[in-house]
Amino acid sequence: MSIEFSDTDIQNFYKLLSLNLTAYNCGNLCAPENGGEPYCCIVENAVPLLYREEFKYLQNRSTIWSRWKPKTKHNKKLKSEGESRTAIFSECKGVQFCERENRSISCRTFPLEPYIDEKGRFSGLIFMKEFRGKCPLIKRLADFQQKTIDNHYKFWCLIFEKRPDEFELYKSTSKGWRISSGKT
Ligand code: SF4
Ligand code: SF4
């Protein structure tokens, strides 16, 4: 059964996700190719999916977040299929208005997600498959800071304790990854 996140939970999550993935600003790697904006901060490239409680929490603290309003038929379908009882697609006002302390979990964890192995163990983090060819960090895995990775791991453990549905979701994503990479 899913347990609702309190404001304190969200504050704890943000604390665990406060460190940068790399010692440098990785936005400088991709922004020149994307009109001066980091690739993952452009909603047409990556739409942040927020837990509903997180969205509410941010709405009480900031004016930068709103519900995502897709414009194309494809994106409208994506929204209706991707949103759920627990999570909604959202968009921020853009990088020039970014408030570091009010970045979403999606912003903070990108481009990594949990990997659940064949035995159903949460064994680590993996680069999100759909962004492997798009985020330049894929060629700089050695630049990831271990302390940040450790904290992200702790963060996902907390999520899975409260949200078994999230565990099931990543179990299925990880299985899909194994199939597509020929490991199953
Ligand atoms: S995570 Fe990847 S896409 Fe996002 S700012 Fe860093 S290098 Fe660019
Ligand atoms: S809140 Fe900041 S980090 Fe997140 S998508 Fe917007 S500009 Fe990027």
Image (tube, helix red, strand yellow):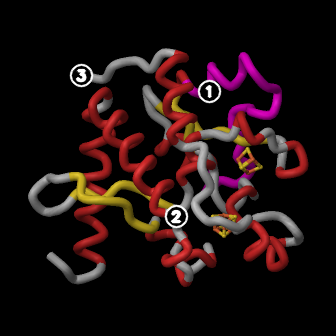
Query: Element at badge 2?
Result: loop
Q: Are marks 2 and 1 in contact (CB under 8 Å)?
A: no
* Front position in the image: 53 or 23: 23
Ligand 2: does it lie within 8 Å of the C-beta at label 1? no
* Three-letter code, disc 3: Met
Upstream in the sequence, badge 1 or badge 3? 3
What residue sits 62% from the left and 27% below the top?
55
Q: Which residue is drawn at 29% across and 77% down?
A: 180
The residue segment tinted magenta is: 54-75
Taking the image as shown, residue 83 lies to the left or right of residue 90, namely: left
* Quadrant of the image containing the C terminus: bottom left
Residue beneath disc 3: 1
Instruction: Determine the CA span between mark 2 and mark 3.
Output: 34 Å
Residue drawn at point x = 35 percent, y = 55 percent: 114
Q: What element carries label 1?
A: helix
Q: Residue 145 carries which label?
A: 2
Q: Return the disc, 2 or 3, that comes first in the chain's sequence.
A: 3
Residue 181, above or below 171: below
| Image spot of residue 15 (x, y percent) | 56, 35
Circle 2 residues within 10 Å: few <14, some 14–19, many ≥20: some
